Image (cartoon, grey):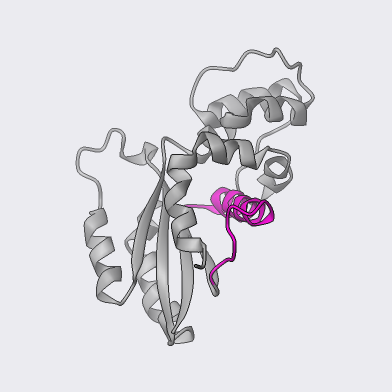
Amino acid sequence: MKQGALLYVEGETEVVFYGLLIKKLIDIGVIKKLKEPFIVKNLKGIGGFKRVALNFFENEVLVKHRNTEFCIGLAYDTDVFRYDRQPAFNWSDIDSYFKNRGVINIVHIKQKYMIEDVFMEDYQGILRYLKLPENSNMPRGNGFEKLQVLFNRANKIYYKGYLSLKFVKELDLYKIYKRRENTFRPLISILDKK
């Protein structure tokens, strides 16, 4: 039986980031051989983990890849749960759903706060990209707010989604990976073919 990997992400910015990060980790040998098929699915928001993820797996992935065992990664920001005493869904219910359909490994790739906070791990790279002085003070706020201020200082606008590709390509993704290695370790575990 073949082994595949499926990565669910919250939005287009994450599609860009994880695609570039995985390519970088393959290029430098952290991931020796990527499982095939490898699928990234944009769920367009945290609510998609309950509805869209399950339907996509049942109606598309299992139908197209009948002789494949899948490992699944659920990549999401934790900022949405910070003030919510009762989240809209239970992660263990989602895990159980996938396990009951033969998924061999399910991992959670939790980004504290938001993906833009991850980008701040290469603050010097952001300053270089924006051609701002190396000694520029880091603005206050969450990662998204910080990027908005920094881009504004450079007379640019920070865009989320696929428009962030050019910017994210310029970041030192290996530095970001090393600084958040514990966060990304589950991702490596589902992607690397043994």
Q: What residue is at 37 percent from the left and 78 percent from the top? A: 58
35 to 82, vertically: above or below: below
Q: Is residue 134 left or right of residue 162?
A: right
Q: Of 121 and 82, which appears nearest the observer? A: 121
Say if residue 173 shows up in the picture: yes
> At which x and y percent is residue 150?
66, 23
Judge whether residue 123 is colored magenta.
Answer: no
Image quarter of residue 128: top right
Q: In the displayed image of the protein, which residue is found farthest to the right? A: 131
Q: Is residue 185 left or right of residue 176?
A: left
142 to 68, vertically: above or below: above
Q: Of 47 and 186, which appears nearest the observer? A: 186
> At which x and y percent is residue 84?
25, 38
Q: What residue is at 53 percent from the left and 34 percent from the top? A: 179
Say if residue 43 shows up in the picture: no
> At which x and y percent is residue 145?
54, 27
Judge whether residue 26 is colored magenta.
Answer: yes
Please count the marks in the image: 0
Q: Of 181 and 6, which appears nearest the observer? A: 181
> At which x and y percent is residue 21?
61, 50
Q: In the displayed image of the protein, which residue is found farthest to the left? A: 86
Q: In the displayed image of the protein, which residue is found farthest to the front? A: 194
Magenta stretch secondary structure, dominant: helix
Q: Is residue 91 left or right of residue 52?
A: left
Tell me the magenta residue range.
10-35
Q: What residue is at 23 percent from the left and 57 percent from the top? A: 92
62 to 5, vertically: above or below: below
- Quadrant of the frame with the N terminus: bottom left
